[in-house]
């Protein structure tokens, strides 16, 4: 379990990244950290890409409907304009942001803010997703969370896409994806490959 470091009196902030496959509990972990900050009367601002239209516009909502209010923004530079007096900044679904997000979160941290970023580390092809790999490189603290493979019960690392939809930006729920371990993910891709022949 991640515990916040002591930082009172320090000038600079820091960057935390919570990443993992779908159904790994990333957003729940983001919400847990931000709620702790809220209970401690720290000013929290939460952002998400406006592309994430699954739920109500201004909420960061996890699969278990645990909600916090978030500001939808079109591009990462908007975060700097709208962050205001917040000392803790949450960013959800970070994989959908542009690459400038890496500079944005570093500016926020230099400005003394604690930045908590959550996002998918890999897309449905098993490739590193958007700005997440670069964020992992610059973060002080990294937490990788794992769901359980629906086929074998091992720890899952991949989001296997059940839908035939080709777009990488497919914001699916349980009917579109399932968590799989590396081996079951690979097996599924081989079977898809033969079906397409
Ligand atoms: Zn498996």
Image (cartoon, rainbow, N blue to C red):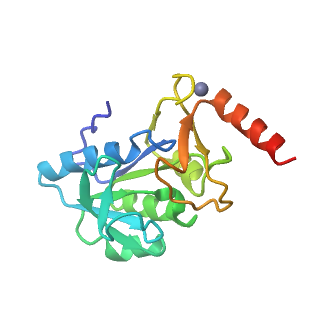
Residue 112 visible to an observer of this rendering: no
- Residue at 40% of width from left, 64% of height from top? 48
Horizontally, residue 55 falls left or right of residue 41, namely right
Image location (x, y in percent) of residue 15:
40, 49
Left or right: 130 as drawn, with respect to 30: right
Residue at (61, 47) in percent of width and height: 162
Spot occupied by residue 173 in the image (x, y as percentages of width and height) = 46, 52
Q: How many marks?
A: 0
Quadrant occupied by the N terminus: top left
* Res. 46 image quadrant: bottom left
In this rendered view, identify the residue nearer to me: 148 or 11: 148
Residue furthest out toward the right: 197
Q: Is residue 128 above or below residue 78?
A: above
Which residue: 71% across, 34% down? 186
Residue 194 in picture, x, y percent from top left: 83, 40
Q: Residue at left 67%, top 27%?
A: 183
The residue nearer to you, when weighing 48 against 52, is: 52
User: Which quarter holds ligand 1?
Assistant: top right
Q: Is residue 58 visible?
A: yes
Q: Quadrant of residue 191?
A: top right
Q: Give x and y (percent) for residue 195.
A: 80, 44
Query: Is 103 or 181 nearer to us in this picture?
Result: 181
- Residue toward you, 65 or 91: 65
């Amino acid at each position: 379990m991640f515990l916040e470091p002591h930082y009172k009196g320090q000038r600079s902030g820091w960057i935390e990244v919570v990443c993992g496959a779908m159904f790994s509990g990333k957003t729940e972990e983001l919400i847990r950290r931000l709620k702790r900050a809220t209970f401690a009367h720290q000013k929290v601002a939460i952002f998400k890409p406006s592309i994430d239209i699954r739920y109500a516009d201004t909420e960061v909502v996890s699969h278990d409907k645990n909600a916090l209010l978030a500001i939808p923004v079109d591009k990462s530079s908007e975060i700097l304009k709208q962050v205001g007096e917040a000392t803790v900044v949450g960013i959800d679904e970070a994989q959908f942001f542009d690459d400038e997000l890496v500079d944005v979160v570093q500016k926020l941290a230099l400005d003394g803010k604690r930045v908590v970023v959550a996002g998918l580390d890999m897309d449905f092809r098993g490739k590193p997703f958007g700005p997440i790999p670069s964020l992992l490189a610059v973060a002080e603290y990294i937490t990788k969370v794992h769901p359980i493979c629906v086929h074998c019960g091992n720890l899952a690392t991949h989001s296997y896409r059940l839908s035939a939809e080709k777009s990488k930006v497919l914001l699916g729920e349980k009917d579109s994806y399932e968590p799989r371990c590396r081996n079951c993910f690979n097996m599924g891709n081989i079977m898809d490959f033969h079906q397409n022949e």
